[in-house]
Amino acid sequence: MASFDYVIKDVHGIHARPATELFKLIKGRDCVVKVAKGDKEVPFKGVMGIMSLGAKQGDSVKFSFEGAEADALMAEVKAFMEANL
Amino acid sequence: MVVYSGKSVFGGIAIGKICVYAKEDSQVKRERIEDPEAEIKRYHEAKDVAIEQLGVLYEKALKEVGEDGAGVFEAHQMMLDDGDYIDGVENIIRTQSVNAEYAVAQTGDQMAQMFLDMEDEYFRGRAADVHDISERLIGVLSGKGSGGIQTDEQVIIVADDLAPSETVQMDKDKILSFVTVHGSANSHTSILAKTMNIPAMIGCDIPLDDTVNGKMAVVDGFEGKVYIEPNEETMAAKKKLYEEEQEKKALLEQLKGKDNVTLDGQHINLYANIGNTKDLGLVLKNDAGGIGLFRSEFIYLGSQDYPTEEEQFEIYKTVAQTMAGKKVIIRTLDIGADKQADYFALPKEENPAMGLRAIRICLTRPEVFKTQLRAILRASAFGKIAIMFPMIISLEEVKEIKGIVNEVKTELDDAGISYDKNIELGIMIETPAAVMVADELAEEVDFFSVGTNDLTQYTLAIDRQNDSLEKFYNSHHPAILKMLKMIVDAAHRHGAWAGICGELGADLTLTKDFLAMGFDELSVSPGRILPLRKIVLETDVSEYKKSLNEANP
């Protein structure tokens, strides 16, 4: 299982726009993705779940990836977060 | 006339008929069904239709309001495909053997509630999105369409709340304004109103029935009020505001981005006067070529003690960066007379207008002066800054000032701190003495800026604040006009440029004269820039000069 932590820089946090783009990235990939904020973890099954974390600027989130494409997907998600959030 | 208040989301005036938008009442009935799997299939088919519908709405919104306004529909498509949402619906259908409409309504309510329970206002606003997609699904499942507005004329839309899919289906050309009972500043409706540049209000206690439907109303987006069937007085006042607003908008459209050049090719810089960083937005909005007067005293007046070099540096740096290479002329502190700050502990004076003020304070308190100069010079590394010194009366003052500036430059060099080595230094011409020695002064500085307010007072020996002297006061007094010519000529003789930052600069009846005199710059309050540009563009200076000569041979 691969995972990484990320501190959100964007003033709006993980709002609808980036949630949508993130979901597009992981949709249909051979990988189970989970996102956690603090002690709340959700399976990344869609934009609702990730938005329900209410991750804002300054919050630390943990992405975990399990499956055949885990490493590749993690690299992409990491790049996305750094570029957009 | 009845008046309702709310929170303004976007300013402006709208005058028109009210059209109350009421949603289709979607009562969802819970019904038992025989075949859960078939029902789940029906749900998925409806989901696909809904996603397709949203795709169409996305395209429409993209054309009408661009990516920002359209993005929400893509987000809605994602929400419909959300794993948790789908699981929720399927679960309810299977375990309870009920219809898809009910399962969707339940799931939607649950997810919406989850968002409503969150702390952040933005996320709470997402509950509305969940409701929107749930209703869309239910609409497809039950075969009902969604309501729209039927109208041939332009209307003010009044509703409880407006979902993105509802607003996008409205004919934009028919909408004058949005007024809702609920809604948030982050909501789609607010974004739409801003994009469409129309007044909008939320949180308004307006009823949604025939007490307002179809009636003539005025929405004052500046005030956050709706006037139903306004009386004559109110209507006249609001109409006037509306017309003024339209004129400003039209002017802005026409003139923005144009060069300030006369019919016969003479250029003039039109800059803005500001006394606060809050006004920076106005400077850019009104297409100023730069800031001709940055009144730095607000920093001193807004403080309980002398502002530190760091505090000042941050402010000057922000201005320089915001103006992105456009000139920012910072005037050193102009305290004294009517601008007082207790901690300066200035002695009480008989004649404050002619007392220890502005540059005189700086030259008698060099530490305060040097702190400001250091902050300005350090900030000059981040943009295009020039420094201007107020209340100058003599060459000796200017030489002393330049000496101190050089001291500060040396200190910065020694500390390895960067600054604009070629920073322009200028002075305000606002005393008769300065006018008379303008030639000597022009040798020493890069530019003059005329402070017409004080210059007029000192020259006419009239206190402008004194109403009883009104009949004697003439801002166009020939003495002033002659002085202006002397100032600009002296500047040009010695390779300096000349501008006006006093109120007279914005006097539209004198613009042609200033052009004829050869002024290089006029710095005025931001809202006056475009009206000035209009005159510049319409003037043929040589023709004007000829007409003057003919009138005064």
Image (tube, grey):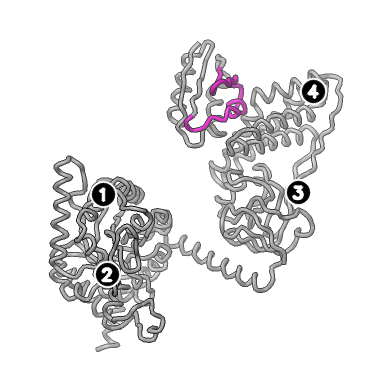
- The Cα–Cα distance between marks 4 and 2, rounded to whole angstroms, is 81 Å
Q: Earlier in the sequence, mark 4 or mark 2?
A: 4
Q: Is residue B342 above or below residue A84?
A: below
Label 1 close to label 2 by CB (< 8 Å): no
* In the image: residue B213, left or right of residue B75: right
Task: Kindly identify the residue that appears in the image at 46 percent across and 64 percent down.
Answer: B251
- Residue beneath label 4, please? B39
- The amino acid marked with disc number 1 is Ala
Q: Earlier in the sequence, mark 1 or mark 4?
A: 4
Quadrant that contains the N terminus of chain B:
bottom right
Q: Which residues are magenta?
A: A33-58
- The Cα–Cα distance between marks 2 and 3, rounded to whole angstroms, is 60 Å
Is residue A33 among what the camera can see?
Answer: yes
- The amino acid marked with disc number 4 is Glu
- The Cα–Cα distance between marks 3 and 1, rounded to whole angstroms, is 59 Å
In the rendered image, residues at marks 1 and 4 fall on the same chain: yes
- Residue beneath label 3, please? B22
Is residue B515 among what the camera can see?
Answer: no
Q: Chain of mark 1?
A: B
> Is B223 part of what is drawn in magenta?
no
Helix, strand or loop under label 3: loop
* Residue B261 point in image, percent of width and height: 32, 65
- Residue beneath label 2, please? B450
Label 2 neighbour load within 10 Å: few <14, some 14-19, many 20+: many
Residue B15, located in which quarter of the rendered image? Answer: bottom right
Residue B310, located in which quarter of the rendered image? Answer: top left
- Residue beneath label 1, please? B375
* Residue B288 point in image, percent of width and height: 37, 59
Helix, strand or loop under label 4: helix
